[in-house]
Image (cartoon, helix red, strand yellow):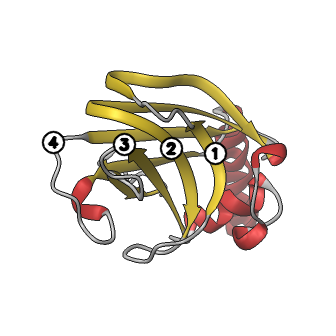
């Protein structure tokens, strides 16, 4: 019984520490070779998304390097290697595009109201849960590549990524 009590106490301590440190993080590394079909480009990107404690919102930063005439960015519902529909708008649409080299979007917030297609779930929490199991990707579009110039799966970072 003593081992059980110690185990429960340790589990509660770890859980409260996790809650005290805030919410979960999801990241995506965006590359042209991840597009379907692949795109040859020097453009690269990274999305970092931090979920709120109540799963009702998430704050994100989107960085693009060597982006030429970038028009928009979205979360799409789809597994790696499979194209899927837009489920959340992150930025855009601007027909002429922006030339981006650095932080493009910083400290922006998405909520349930930003979910535009319920294919991966009707709420932001649902969409982010689908991301954790590999069913959501980030896609950045450009004038030259309107279907997408760089793409990456949204996932929880491994210990080596942090």
Q: CA distance from mark 2 to mark 3?
A: 12 Å
**Front position in the image: 91 or 161:** 91
Question: Is residue 93 depicted above or below 117 in this figure?
Answer: above
In percent of the image, x 57 and y 33: which residue is there? 60
Tell me the crowding category of disc 4: few under 14, some 14 to 19, or many 20 or more residues within 10 angstroms, Cα based: few
Label 2 vs 1, first from the N-terminus? 2
Secondary element at tag 3? loop
- Residue 146 position within the rendered picture, expressed as x and y whole percent measured from the top left: 41, 52
**Which residue, given by chain and number where applicable, does mark 3 sit on?**
143
In percent of the image, x 26 and y 52: which residue is there? 31
Q: Is residue 52 visible?
A: no
In the image as oriented, which residue stretches furthest toward the front?
Answer: 96
- Residue 88 position within the rendered picture, expressed as x and y whole percent measured from the top left: 66, 51
Is 40 situated left or right of 90 in this image?
left
Q: Nearer the viewer, mark 4 or mark 3?
A: 3
**Which residue, given by chain and number where applicable, does mark 4 sit on?**
42
Is 139 situated left or right of 121 in this image?
left
Q: CA distance from mark 2 to mark 4?
A: 17 Å
């Amino acid at each position: 019984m003593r081992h059980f009590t110690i185990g429960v106490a340790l589990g509660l301590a770890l859980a409260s520490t996790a809650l005290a440190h805030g919410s979960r993080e999801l990241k995506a590394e965006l590359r042209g070779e991840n597009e379907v079909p692949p795109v040859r480009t020097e453009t690269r990107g990274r999305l970092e998304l931090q979920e709120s404690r109540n799963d009702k919102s998430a704050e994100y930063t989107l960085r693009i390097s060597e982006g030429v005439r970038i028009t928009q960015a979205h979360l799409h519902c789809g597994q790696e290697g499979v194209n899927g529909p837009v489920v959340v708008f992150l930025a855009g649409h601007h027909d002429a595009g922006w030339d981006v080299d650095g932080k493009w979007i910083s400290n922006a917030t998405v909520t349930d109201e930003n979910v535009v297609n319920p294919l991966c779930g009707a709420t932001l929490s649902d969409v982010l849960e689908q991301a954790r199991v590999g069913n959501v990707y980030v896609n950045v579009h450009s004038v030259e590549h309107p279907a997408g110039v760089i793409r990456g799966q949204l996932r929880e970072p491994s210990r080596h990524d942090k």
